[in-house]
Image: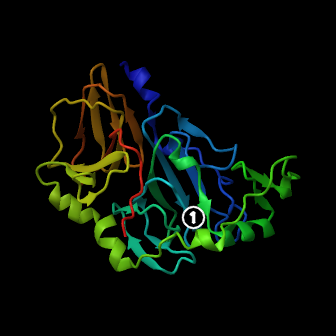
Amino acid sequence: MTPQEMEHRIVRYGDLQPCKTAFIDAHTPGSDQKENFTIIGGGVSESPDQHVHIGIPHGFNIGAAGQPPKCRNSLHSHRTAEVFFVLKGRWRFFWGRHGDAGEVVLEEGDIFNIPTGIFRGFENIGTDYGMIMAILGGDDAGGGVIWAPQVITDATDHGLVLGENGKLYDSKKGQSLPDGVSPMPLLTDAELKTYPEPKASDVIPGYVARYWDLMAMADKDPVNVIGENGLLRDKPGFEVALMNRASASEAMHAHDHPSVLMPMRGHWRVNWEGGSATLAPGDTMSVPAGLMHNAVPSMTGEASLYHVVATGDPAGATWTG
């Protein structure tokens, strides 16, 4: 593969195109300053304005959320896996029907394999613009977002209506539901009772990994963070590993499924049969299945990189209770 061909599979942090109207809470005070990014795959955006950087199916989706301080992402759920790692800032993740069942604060580099089937939200509690990178299970990311009822109700008060077709309509732009399209129905009380409300003490040990713990464990080989045999044991349809300077290898290798390289710290030189490229924190690189390649730090200093590879497993539920 030529460098020109591979460049189309690299999304630079500085080239990310945000969408500020991606979801139903785009006008709701406290959530109206967030930016959403769809990097690989179709994502779960409800807006036609969302730009997709790489549409090639990988077996998972890669996205990101950028938010200024005190900006919140409203309570929602997914049918497949949702994994976040903090690229910039300090973030509070919370969950439960009303967001009060449990919470955890993540620092830069920390990773959270959020259990499916529970309502979750997050907010930037740092002092500067923050960025979290996301991995969503499946090529269709589970068919969209399931919102807590109050989120839909609040959004209606601020001019946004979600149709049962999964699309947003903005009354501030003169839009209304098309003929034959009803509003997205609110979850019933019976349906809401099927959403677990686990305590933080039940969630954090098996679903959160701290960056500096991972850096220590990756002193010889990359540490398998999420996977069937990972530190956070799960089969969400992909595996996530972290490598650093000590565990990076110049040995060329390939995967049976597409993989993605996402630097956390430092600059990384990726070499493949046909060329090479340098990645910086926040960049995302898609590596085709079967392509021999390696990734090694190209400068001195702290260096770490998250590696995601599809497994072909269905992106099933992660919360086991």
In this view, the residue farthest toward the front is 190
Can the viewer see residue 71?
no
Quadrant the C terminus occupies: bottom left
Where is residue 20? Give x, y as percent.
66, 54
Q: Is residue 123 left or right of residue 231?
A: right
In this view, the residue farthest toward the left is 220
Q: Out of 209 and 294, give the one closest to the viewer.
A: 209
Residue at which label 1 appears: 76
Q: Is residue 163 left or right of residue 20?
A: right
Element carrying mark 1: strand
Q: Quadrant of residue 307?
A: top left
Where is residue 313? Give x, y as percent.
35, 42
Quadrant the N terminus occupies: top left
Residue occupying the point 47% across, 53% down: 80
Q: Amino acid at mark 1?
A: His
Where is residue 266? Give x, y as percent.
30, 49
Residue occupying the point 38% across, 22% down: 3
Q: Out of 253 and 269, give the one closest to the viewer.
A: 253
Count of picture labels = 1
